[in-house]
Image: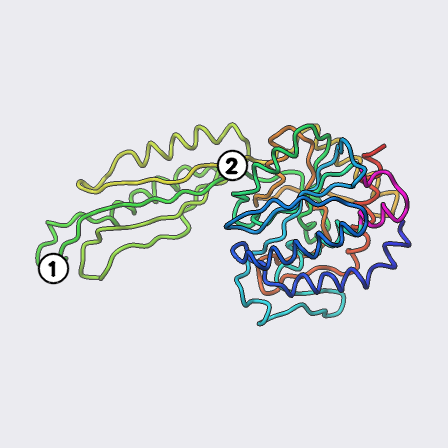
Amino acid sequence: MEGYIQQCKTEMLQLIEKLVNIDSGSYVKKGIDEIGGILQKKYEEIGFVVEVKTEAKYGNHLVIRHERSLHPKIILVAHMDTVFPEGTVNKRPFQIKGNRAYGPGVVDMKSSLVELLYAMKALVHCGSNACENVQIILNGDEEIGSPSSRELIEEQAVGKEYALIMEPARKDGSLVTARRGGGRYKLIIKGKAAHSGIEPEKGRSAIEELAYKIIQLHNLTNHEQGISVNVGIISGGSSVNTISDKAVAHIDIRITEKEQAQELEKKIKRICANTEVRGTEIQLEGAIRRPPMEYNEQTKKLLHIIQEVGEEIGLHVHNTATGGGGDASFTSATGVPTVDGLGPVGGNAHSKEEYIEIDTLTERTILLAKTIERLSR
């Protein structure tokens, strides 16, 4: 198997280049669907059946399993969308510099898409029945919270024994065994406009009310408990000499344990139920929708298996926790042992400097294929 995958390295890089050079931001549906079409054809060529879940607004999702598959016990999840807007590829297409490859979405997670495909190709090439034990989901909206694919992922996770999520490995090669959950809120405050010099007493400042709310919301942060509340974007007012009649805040929430969600939501609603500035009104939208991926005994056992496979191929596999969210939270919350970060090693995701370490592409493909074999015994 190792020899076959090593021989495919150039071919894998060529496919990564092809995928990276297609704009597929979360709202660039045509690009996501083009990538889906390319991958669908390649999976069908090696005996897999691809079901296309058509979406009107977001990119279509693919559900993939081998034509002989009956009751697969492993679910693998990877996403086809990126954070980059249409036109990014023209400005900075795929390129190789030394031992690294660069380009929009190269590590998050177009290289993972190719790694996953070639792990399946390797299993098929070697005649391994393990290729029949996987259910693959390629979704098109992960970068915006998986609004249309979450239900699909949760449905497909039911009855599975293991979940392997294809986000990239960390810069040091670590797999991810814990992720913070969270959500987003939008706070809209309505006031009353007035001239700030002629008759300020007639105004009711939405910005002033928002200032009170920002302080109160930020005070909910508790770093020791892994809770953070951050008002990341604010807007309001129409001119410097006008009492503002509207102000808006966008709030990011992060939690470490799923039990924290309900109490934190109550506190946020309590803060926004009353005003400090008389005559202002508050409208709160949003919720804590993404559960955390918790590091539990099931996860430890799965990690241990992956580490054993790693040792067999001369790869020392470490694990870490991250504050970022991901689809691993959804499989984990259904009770399926979940490990994330099984993609190639890279870094600087979501930036102009995003890269993968080319040499890790084949080693991580070997690790993934052999892990699937081990879990299928």
Whether label 2 touches label 1, CB < 8 Å:
no
Secondary structure under the numbered disc 2 in the rendered image: strand
- Which residue does the numbered mark 2 point to in the structure image? 255
Mark 1 neighbour density, 10 Å: few (under 14) some (14–19) many (20 or more): few
Residue 311 is left or right of residue 20, and the answer is right
Per the picture, the main secondary structure of the magenta-coloured stretch is helix
Name the residue: 18% across, 40% down. Answer: 278
Between the C-alphas of marks 2 and 1, the distance is: 44 Å
Q: Please, which residue is most extreme toward the left here?
A: 198
Q: Nearer the viewer, residue 185 or 160?
A: 160
Magenta-tinted stretch:
119-132
Name the residue: 63% across, 35% down. Answer: 331
Is residue 130 shown in magenta?
yes
**Could you tell me which quadrant the C terminus lies in?**
top right
Q: How is the image coloured?
A: rainbow
> Residue 224's x, y, as percent?
52, 36
Q: Is residue 336 above or below residue 23?
A: above
> Residue 178's x, y, as percent?
63, 38
> Residue 171's x, y, as percent?
69, 54
Residue 4 is left or right of residue 15, and the answer is right
Name the residue: 64% across, 46% down. Answer: 52
Residue 100 is left or right of residue 229, and the answer is right
Secondary structure under the numbered disc 1 in the rendered image: loop
Q: Earlier in the sequence, mark 2 or mark 1?
A: 1
Q: Image quarter for residue 180?
A: top right
Is residue 17 shown in magenta?
no
> Residue 38's x, y, as percent?
70, 57
Task: Name the amino acid type tagged 1.
Answer: Gly
Task: Name the amino acid type tagged 2.
Answer: Ile
- Which residue does the numbered mark 1 point to in the structure image? 197
